[in-house]
Image (cartoon, helix red, strand yellow):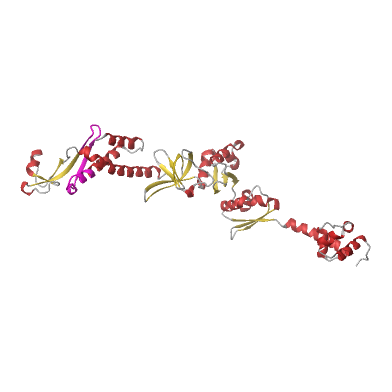
């Protein structure tokens, strides 16, 4: 056995973690394949085995041959004449099988290159099987690794003995990765199809946030606090609904931590993604009020049949309730499993308009105007006849969209120079 094969065994055993017996078994299989290729007619041998002595560096090939009469001996690859067999074992009988060393001279030196490729294929397959066995039950865990390389927009991550892939769909689009970066990721699945086992990783999956909270918040790991729901737009905002089985434990406070220490660690891991922690409730009215904070809701209407929540907010709270690019309302809908509709509260505006209409009608009666002109005059600042009397004729004509003659008539009425209509 040459030194490079010995080094290969050591590499796969120590660096890749493949059992030494499996490495040697792969080597033995490779030498048998090499023998069949090198020796003409060796393909006809039915039973063969290879024996590798890793200490002495020797390789021997053995074949099980059938004992046949000397006169019938024809197939040298599968048969042995009785006379030759009896030299080894005088009591041997016809049709029995005996194992003989059939190793050609200098076989190890000649066969090594032929065997090396076959061995590598077997070891790669053994490595893939080991990846699958080790990781098949780790879907849902968080692992750490180093960015090794890129395959188009996919990120290949070195996990130590193994390599994981973070497809572009599982990346956070606001994050940039560089070769050598140390990152943590969520194991979405271990797929064992096509090219072999693949460890699929993600940093955008909602459960990545769940695992970070479980690791950071003791009350979640001991089940005092439960995460009832997560809605996430990776890189921008995440909403987490929590609930406590113990009335004495504040679930939101437990997740935030002293001076926000716990949630700050999570936000740091998420590269400053905004994280809202919400108290969960099975009452849609209470839940939507918590979910849409900091906006203050004026009213909440529940349509249980269609699972729709209609909420109204003051104009100054409308942008808070909807959020940037609609994220607040959209994530609240996902978190609740209801369609959350946010509208501006028109009741204050309606009340204001009624007051304006009442005041304008009073001006209309004083100056003998119709309500439409009086409304324009009031909105132009003419809240009383005394104020109108001080207005320039051109200003009245422009704002009421009337002629100067009509504006002079209105001004005269305001000053009391004209008889009331």
Spot occupied by residue 37 in the image (x, y as percentages of width and height): 21, 46
**Which residue corresponds to the image point at 56% horizontal and 54% vertical from the top-left?**
337
> Where does the magenta region start and end?
33-59
State whether residue 231 appears in this view: no
**Which residue corresponds to the image point at 70% horizontal and 51% vertical from the top-left?**
316
Spot occupied by residue 294 in the image (x, y as percentages of width and height): 65, 47
Q: Is residue 155 left or right of residue 289?
A: left
Q: In this view, does 105 lie above or below 205?
A: above
Viewer-closest of 128 and 373: 373
State whether residue 26 appears in this view: yes
| Quarter of the N terminus within the rendering | top left
**Which residue corresponds to the image point at 39% horizontal and 41% vertical from the top-left?**
162
**Residue 346: quadrant of the picture:** bottom right
| Quarter of the C terminus within the rendering | bottom right
**Residue 120: quadrant of the picture:** top left
Spot occupied by residue 276 in the image (x, y as percentages of width and height): 59, 45
């Amino acid at each position: 056995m040459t030194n490079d094969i010995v080094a290969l065994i050591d590499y796969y055993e120590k660096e890749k973690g493949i059992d030494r017996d499996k490495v040697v078994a792969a080597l033995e299989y490779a030498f048998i394949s090499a023998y069949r290729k090198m020796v003409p007619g060796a393909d006809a041998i039915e039973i063969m085995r290879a024996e590798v002595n890793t200490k002495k560096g020797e390789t021997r090939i053995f074949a099980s041959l059938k004992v046949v009469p000397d006169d019938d001996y024809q197939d040298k690859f599968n048969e042995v004449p009785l006379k030759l067999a009896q030299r080894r074992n005088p009591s041997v009988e016809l049709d029995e099988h005996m194992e003989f060393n059939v190793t050609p001279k200098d076989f190890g030196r000649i066969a090594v290159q032929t065997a090396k490729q076959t061995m590598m294929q077997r070891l790669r397959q053994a490595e893939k099987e080991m990846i699958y066995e080790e990781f098949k039950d780790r879907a849902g865990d968080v692992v750490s690794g180093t960015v090794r390389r890129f395959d188009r927009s996919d990120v290949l991550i070195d996990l130590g003995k193994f390599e994981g892939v973070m497809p572009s769909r599982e990346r956070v689009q606001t994050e940039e990765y560089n070769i050598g970066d140390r990152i943590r990721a969520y194991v979405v699945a271990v797929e064992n199809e096509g090219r072999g086992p693949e460890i699929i990783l993600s940093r955008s999956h909602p459960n990545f946030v769940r695992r970070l909270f479980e690791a950071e918040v003791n009350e979640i790991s001991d089940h005092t606090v439960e995460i009832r729901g997560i809605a996430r737009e990776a890189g921008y905002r995440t909403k987490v609904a929590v609930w406590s089985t113990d009335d004495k434990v504040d679930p939101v406070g437990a997740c935030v931590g002293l001076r926000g220490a716990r949630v700050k660690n999570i936000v740091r891991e998420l590269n400053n993604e905004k994280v809202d922690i919400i108290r969960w409730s099975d009452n849609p009215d209470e839940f939507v009020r918590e979910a849409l904070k900091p906006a203050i809701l004026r009213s909440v209407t529940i349509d249980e049949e269609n699972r729709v929540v209609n909420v109204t907010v003051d104009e100054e709270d409308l942008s808070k309730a909807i959020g940037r690019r609609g994220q607040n309302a959209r994530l609240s809908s996902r978190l609740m499993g209801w369609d959350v509709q946010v509208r501006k509260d028109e009741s204050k505006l309606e009340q204001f308009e009624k007051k304006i209409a009442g005041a304008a009608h009073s001006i209309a009666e004083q100056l003998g105007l119709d309500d439409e002109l009086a409304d324009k005059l009031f909105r132009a600042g003419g809240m009383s006849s005394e104020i109108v009397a001080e207005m320039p004729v051109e200003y009245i004509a422009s704002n009421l969209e009337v002629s100067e003659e009509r504006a002079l008539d209105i001004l005269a009425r305001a000053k009391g120079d004209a008889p009331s209509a």
